[in-house]
Image (cartoon, grey):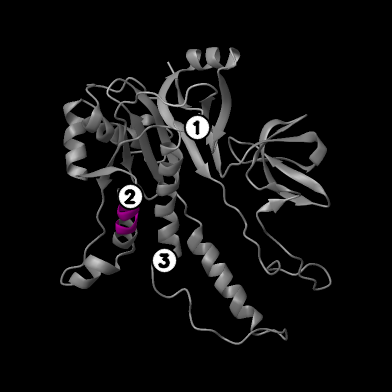
Amino acid sequence: MKYVPVVSKTGKPLMPCSNYRANELVCKGKALRRFKSGLFYIKLTEREDGEVQPIAVGIDPGSKREAFTVKSESHTYLNILADAVTWVKEAIERKRNARRARRQRKTPCRQNRMNRAKGGIPPSTKARWQLKLRIVNILRKIFPITDYVVEDISATTKKGCNKWNKNFSPLEVGKKWFYSELRKLGNVEFKEGWWTFEERSTYGLKKTKSKMLESFDAHNVDSWVLANWKVGCHTKPENTEITMMTPIEFHRRQLHRFEPSIGGERTRYGGTMSLGFKKGSIVKHKKYGICYIGGNQEGRLSLHNLDNGKRLCKRAKTEDTQFLAYNSFRKRG
């Protein structure tokens, strides 16, 4: 049985209900269908409050995939397997090379400024940990979450380099920032990787070695164990369905394209808006159904598949496109 998140008339997260109950409430006019970053939930039209139970989120960080499990004592409501943000480092390098190349051309440019990117958390590291925080903030808006249990990970240490080990590892810096932000949202507890392994073994659960497999046993088995330790009393997962979430890579606004077109003209490129629509927004098209907005060209929209990101068309008319919800993820499952 699938469960649907529920929020009150005022937007307060309440306890989820079954999909059958959600359909009944919508048909009777007591609830409205809503989406939050591709996740379906209902908003009640009459109730403003209600009793809630403790709900925990188990978080299993990873270099390529992140796992989240939303669970109460009675049910496992949602298992999310998210792709990590891996393109920021290359994007920063391309931007840096383009800036340096402009200084060698005969084109007006400002004087050199100090390196404003120096210091703080590296962009690629911060983007990775920001994704975890983004997903947590999405979940806490539709579930009454009280606790967060995170599998604590450590960076590779260097013998005799205490300063590096404590402060300068990007993993450690990003992790400390994420933990500090997470503590502002609720009670946070941490478990080591060896503890997760032993707890998983007591339930007779095994984790597959194929880390990129879209399966519950790849990463969500650990996030389930973490959440179950905090609020659950189950000896095995009763809900192993997973929801895949992939952050959409937006091409931010650039001064112009990196490569000139015929005649040496460098046209403008990028941006997060397409003919009045925000890129990534979920829309309904007359021909292609539910999809999301990509770029635009010559007054027409580019539409993409929500499951795999494949472009469906690049000549869609705005009048044939109905806006449904803002979105920055591709969701499937």
Can residue 208 be seen from the camera position used here? Answer: no
Q: Amino acid at mark 2?
A: Lys
- Residue 163 located left or right of residue 262: left
Label 3 sits on a secondary structure element that is loop
Q: Please tell me whether mark 2 sits on a helix, a strand or a loop.
A: loop
- In this rendering, the answer to whether 223 lies above or below 204 is below
State the SS at label 1: loop
Three-letter amino acid code at the position of disc 1: Thr
Foreground of the two, 57 or 100:
57
Q: Which stretch did the figure color magenta?
A: 176-182
Residue 122: mark in rendering: 3
Q: Position of residue 101 (x, y in %)?
A: 63, 79
Q: Which residue is mark 1?
A: 10
According to the image, label 2 marks what residue?
A: 184
Q: Quadrant of residue 203?
A: top left
The N terminus lies in which quarter of the figure? Answer: top left
